[in-house]
Image (tube, rainbow, N blue to C red):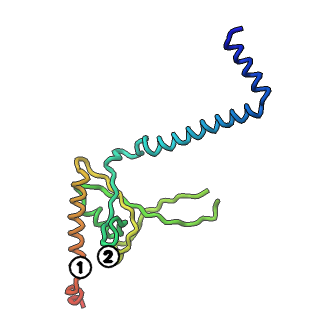
Amino acid sequence: MSRTALDLKVALRAVIRSRFVSMLAIVAFALGVAVTTAVFSIFNGVLLAPLPFPEPDRLVMVYDTQPACATCPASYPKYNDWRERNHPTISTASRSTSSASCRRRSRIDIFVPLQRKLDPATRGNHFLTTYARLKPGVTVECATAEMRALGHTLARSIRIFRSPRCARSSR
């Protein structure tokens, strides 16, 4: 009999004699493999795998800057201004989350298009998380400069719209 076959025969006899210890060793080995697989899957999915979007390096988040908040979500009028007036640099998209309860048990995600009236009075209602895709050839620095310039233009037009002189003349 070969040396390997003899070793397997002795190992099999040891496993049969001490079944409890053998089962514990097998369970420990299986748990180790499962944990290692789970950790690698998470690591791979979060850090190594590319995002499921074309050109993910061109995706950015756009914030509304306020004196009290450096990274505020956008209001709907502000988002509309960004979308309408910033064609050369970025294309924007936005989302808002809210919850509703159903009387079912599996949780259901429902996507509903945003349907809002453009009301200047809602400019202070910041609830939209805004994303943008930089157009080809546009750097983040260039887009930031253009968005800041657009923000200053919008701030001036809002101040003119809300100035006391205009309010008195409309009475």
Spot the residue most to the right.
17
Work out whether residue 2 or residue 50 is closer to the camera in this orientation and state it: 2
Depth check, front residue: 15 or 145:
15
Numbered tag placed on residue 120 in the rendering: 2
- Residue beneath disc 1: 161
| Residue 45 image offset from top left, x and y in percent | 47, 43
Q: On the rendered structure, is 46 left or right of 145?
A: right
Q: In the image as oriented, which residue stretches furthest toward the bottom? A: 171
Compared to residue 125, the image places residue 55 above or below, namely above
Mark 2: give few (<14), some (14-19) or many (20+) Cα within 10 Å. few
Residue 8 percent coordinates (x, y): 70, 18
The first of marks 2 and 1 along the sequence is: 2
Which residue appears at 41% of the width and 65% of the height? 114
Q: Quadrant of residue 2?
A: top right
**Where's the C terminus, which quadrant?**
bottom left
Query: Spatial distance from mark 2 to mark 1, Cα to Cα?
Result: 10 Å
Q: Quadrant of the N terminus?
A: top right
Residue occupying image coordinates x 41% and y 61%:
95
Q: Secondary structure at mark 1?
A: helix
**Could you say which is closer to the camera, residue 111 or residue 69?**
69
The amino acid on which the numbered mark 2 sits, given as a three-letter code, is Pro
Q: Is residue 88 left or right of residue 128?
A: left
Q: Amino acid at mark 1?
A: Phe
- Residue under the point 21% across and 74% down: 157
- As helix, strand or loop, the secondary structure at mark 2 comes to helix
| Contact check, label 2 and label 1, Cβ < 8 Å | yes
User: Residue 54 placed where, x, y %?
Assistant: 36, 45
Number of numbered tags placed on the structure image: 2
